[in-house]
């Protein structure tokens, strides 16, 4: 199981975020070095198995959005890590620019560098250990964005969505070796409030991504508070940094 399936994967993994004006639909950033978003999450399987935790951080760097994700997963008694840093244009379309993905599994390493040229063609370099694979080139459809920016994209869409209304999107799954970095479609639907969303003051959103269905409870900026994935029996919860960093040691 990969954090990307949260989107966050299911990518589908995440986790982002932004100060959105419901009136103008524009984004405003304060002139400060502080991150736009810095959120921590824990992942639990079958209600009791502590699978892992991760941090999502979004910053504004030279008029570009920078998304950084760091994941810690406990697999076969090892703590494996995944790190991703991605840049996009600071626009509602979140036009993709470039990214770097790095993961470790025991002694194995995987590094992926993606770069979008002229806003149309994705070039990807992959290195497994000391072996470099052939460069992958993919032509991107308009309004395609990096999957890690899904919560940011969702934040832009929420003011326009009504209950029962759905909207589709196209994304680049940054570590998608299986599909050779092909564009992945998805669809979100704003649901009517339930007991949890009413209690927490969040929006309930259904997500379909790579044939996987999940339910997201998000605030007005698209930041997830809770993600439920019935098919994998996984629940993701937003917690404090202190709780997250102790999650796998308890």
Image (cartoon, rainbow, N blue to C red):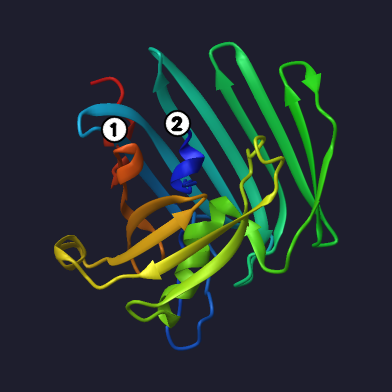
User: Which is nearer the N-term, disc 2 or disc 1?
Assistant: 2
On screen, residue 168 versus residue 90, left or right, reads: left
The answer to which of 50 and 137 lies nearer the viewer is 137
Residue 244 percent coordinates (x, y): 31, 35
| Residue underneath mark 1 | 45
Whether 218 is drawn above or below 209: the answer is: below
Label 1, secondary structure: give it.
strand
Residue 164 percent coordinates (x, y): 34, 76
- Separation of marks 2 and 1 at Cα, in angstroms: 11 Å
The 10 Å Cα crowd at callout 1, few under 14, some 14 to 19, many 20 or more, is some
- The mark found on residue 11 in the picture is none
Q: Quadrant of the C terminus?
A: top left
Q: Are the residues flagged by discs 2 and 1 in contact, CB closer than 8 Å?
A: yes
| Residue underneath mark 2 | 1
Q: What residue appears at the point 66 percent right and 62 percent down from the top-left corner?
A: 144
On screen, residue 190 versus residue 64, left or right, reads: left
The 10 Å Cα crowd at callout 2, few under 14, some 14 to 19, many 20 or more, is few
On screen, residue 131 versus residue 144, left or right, reads: right
The answer to whether residue 247 of the structure is visible from this angle is no
Q: What residue appears at the point 79 percent right and 18 percent down from the top-left corner?
A: 131
**Picture quadrant where residue 136 is located:** top right
The answer to which of 57 and 174 lies nearer the viewer is 174
Residue 91 percent coordinates (x, y): 63, 71
The answer to which of 127 and 162 lies nearer the viewer is 162
């Amino acid at each position: 199981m990969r954090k990307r399936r949260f989107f966050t994967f299911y990518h589908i993994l995440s986790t982002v975020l932004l100060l959105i004006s419901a009136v103008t639909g524009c984004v405003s950033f304060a002139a400060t070095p502080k991150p736009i978003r810095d959120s921590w999450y824990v992942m639990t399987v079958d209600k009791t198995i502590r699978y892992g935790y991760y941090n999502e951080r979004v910053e504004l760097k030279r008029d570009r959005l920078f998304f950084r994700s760091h994941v810690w997963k406990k697999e076969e008694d090892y703590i494996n890590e995944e790190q991703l840093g991605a840049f996009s244009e600071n626009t509602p379309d979140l036009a993709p620019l470039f990214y770097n993905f790095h993961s470790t599994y025991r002694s194995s390493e995987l590094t992926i560098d993606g770069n979008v040229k002229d806003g149309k063609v994705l070039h990807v370099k992959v290195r497994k250990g000391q072996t470099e694979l052939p460069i992958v080139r993919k032509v991107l459809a308009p309004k395609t964005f990096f999957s890690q920016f899904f919560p940011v994209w969702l934040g832009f869409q929420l003011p326009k969505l009504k209950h029962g209304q759905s909207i589709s999107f196209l994304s680049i799954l940054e570590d998608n070796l299986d599909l050779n970095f092909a564009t992945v479609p998805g669809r979100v639907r704003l649901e009517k409030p339930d007991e949890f969303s009413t209690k927490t003051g969040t929006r309930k959103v259904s997500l379909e991504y790579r044939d996987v269905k999940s339910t997201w409870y998000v605030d007005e900026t698209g930041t997830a508070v809770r993600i439920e994935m019935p098919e994998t029996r996984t629940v993701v919860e937003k917690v404090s940094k202190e709780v997250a960093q102790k999650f796998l040691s308890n």
